[in-house]
Structure formats: structure tokens, C-alpha cells
Image (cartoon, rainbow, N blue to C red):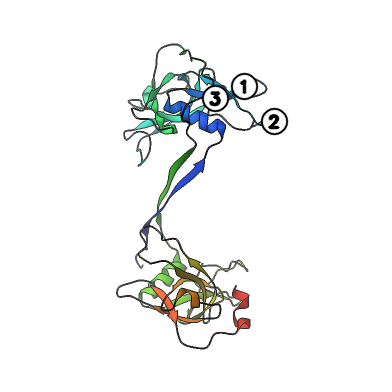
Amino acid sequence: MPDVLKAPLVVEFPFTRSLGPVQSAFLTGLRERVVLGVRTTDGRTLVPPAEYDPVTAEEIRDLVEVAPTGTVTTWAWNHAPRRGQPLDTPFAWVLVRLDGADTALLHALDAPGPDAVRTGMRVRVRWAAERSGAITDIACFEPYDGGPAQPDGHCGDFADPVTGIVAPARLDYTYTPGRAQTAHLDALAERRIVGERCPSCRKVYVPPRGACPTCGVATSERVEVGPRGTVTTFCIVNIKARGLDIEVPYVYAHIALDGADLALHGRIGGIPYDRVRMGLRVEPVWTEGARHPDHYRPTGEPDADYDTYRELL
């Protein structure tokens, strides 16, 4: 049996959003050690606050302060915290109904072990030492034996309110290709491009998927395609990506390899970006030790006729 291919992959980007008046007041309140909810027309208090009533869909802006103490409604133990989570030691994820609220807030509970956590236990907010107007201004919850704390009745008006947040989003995972993708990657390491043909419609898919997306039948007949192909459509990239050592502007294109019935993605080089065009004939350029083409360059052939690739747009 050949070795199973796998690779660690990370998808990461900063998510930037502006805040409406309700979310702005909520996060600014956390910065000031104040927990705010919003009151619905039927008298319920929602924490975290929503901008629209989940029952009636009416806009709601009646802010009301609730206590930083509350009751655990349900919980789950996290025995192995991950990067970026509230605590770096094992803790409980808890839903806490704060005193004065009718809904529960999800956060972390600092507890010595799962035996110390129970539904119905009393907890209170542990504030972060440095606060900026984010949910992390609540460092976590901690066990609490006292009665409900008394809020000051804050109305939600603050100087210098928080108007926007940047939330980093990151996904770490291990990718393992299947049989068809493994064969494709192994061929690329030999500077060959291999797809698979559908036994029903006879289309050749590159990269292969192991099944025909049109007919829904398994594919197993391997077909070597290219290496030359035709630019079917393209875009000009003007924003430099972090960690990508390519000067902008550059062109990223769909390329229909000769013998393939599906266009793949590739960067176009060896030609000024403003001279790339639909129908341009290109070929792959490999760098030493690479497992895939670095980019595609013009072959010098006449442009392909539109009718030869219009079905692949």
C-alpha cells in the first residue's frame, strides 16, 4: 500500500465588522465592566443583546443593565484548550443566565475539574485586567457563593463608544486526499498532469474528483492531459497577499488543458499583465523540487478559437 498523503493546512483571516448601536453599547459596556442586555416589547431581557426581537422581528434598542452574577444552565468540560481560547488550562464551557436576564451567555468557567461544575451553580464574571471593548473583556466566569449583585441601572450611554471590531478567524486542519487526488499529486511530482475520465459522459476532469459531478458515477480511468492549455478567462490581482512573494499586479486565470473538460486555476507569467487575453495558449513552468507548476507562460502559438473553449468558461 502506498503511503497516505496528508498535509497540515491553515485558513486564517481577520474579520472586520462595524457595530450598530446595540452591539456597540454592549461591547463598550464590557470595557467599562458593565453588562448590558436589551428589553423586548414583551418584557424579556436578552443577553447578549440582539438588534431585532427573535420572536416578532421588531427592532429593539431598550438597553438595560444586568448583574455580573448568574446561574449555569448547562455546561461541557474542555479537557484540552486550543490556541486562542479563553483559558490555557482545562475549563468548562458554560451557558450562564445572568441575574436579570432571560437568556444565557456562552463563556468559559474557571474550575478545578468537571466534578466542581454543575447545572444550577452560581457564578460571577471575572473581568480581564486590560479591556478594549470585546467579549474577551470577560476573562471568564468563576464560582460564586453570594446572592445576585445589584446593577447600577446604566442606560448604555458611554463616552468614546466602540464602533467596530476585528475578530481573527482561523481554521487548522489536516487534509488527506483520496485515491484520485493522490494519483494526481503523485503525477505532478513527476511533472505530469493526470485526470480521470467519466465512463458515462466521457468527460475528463482535472484535478480528478473520484466521481463525475454530472453523472454521479465513480471514475477510475486515468488520462494524461496537457501540459499545454488555453486561457478561458482571467482576473488581474492588484492586492498583495500576505506571505505570497509575487509582485502585483499579476494575472490569475482559468486554464483549459488540452484533453481536459474542466478548467483549472493557474497564475500567468512571462507576459505583461495587460497582454493576457482569453484564448492565449500557455504551458506550465516548473521550479526545481516543486510538486506543482509555479505558473503558466505563453507558448507562442496562435490564440485558440473561441469555439474551442467556450463550453469551459
Residue at position x 30%, y 75% from top? 288
- Label 1 Cα crowd, 10 Å radius (few <14 / some 14-19 / many 20+): some
Q: For the residue labelled by badge 3, is the local secondary structure a helix, a strand or a loop?
A: strand
- Label 2 Cα crowd, 10 Å radius (few <14 / some 14-19 / many 20+): few
Q: Look at discs 1 and 3 and give the one toward the viewer.
A: 3
Q: Is the Cβ of the residue at disc 2 closer than 8 Å to that at disc 1? A: no
Q: Which residue is mark 1?
A: 44
Look at the image and tell me whether residue 226 can be seen: no
231 is higher (above) or lower (below) than 60: below
Q: Position of residue 178 (x, y in %)?
A: 45, 64
3D distance between C-alphas at marks 3 and 2? 17 Å
Q: For the residue labelled by badge 1, is the local secondary structure a helix, a strand or a loop?
A: loop
Q: Position of residue 266 (x, y in %)?
A: 46, 71
Residue at position x 48%, y 45% from top? 16
Position of residue 217 in the picture relative to residue 67 (left or right) = right
Depth order, front residue of 85/130: 130
Q: Tag 2: residue type?
A: Thr
Residue that lies at the very extreme toward the left in this rendered image: 288
192 is higher (above) or lower (below) than 125: below
Residue that lies at the very extreme toward the front in this rendered image: 159
Q: Which residue is mark 3?
A: 37
Q: Look at discs 3 and 2 and give the one toward the viewer.
A: 3
Numbered badge on residue 56: 2
Q: Position of residue 168 (x, y in %)?
A: 42, 45
Depth order, front residue of 164/230: 164
3D distance between C-alphas at marks 1 and 3? 10 Å
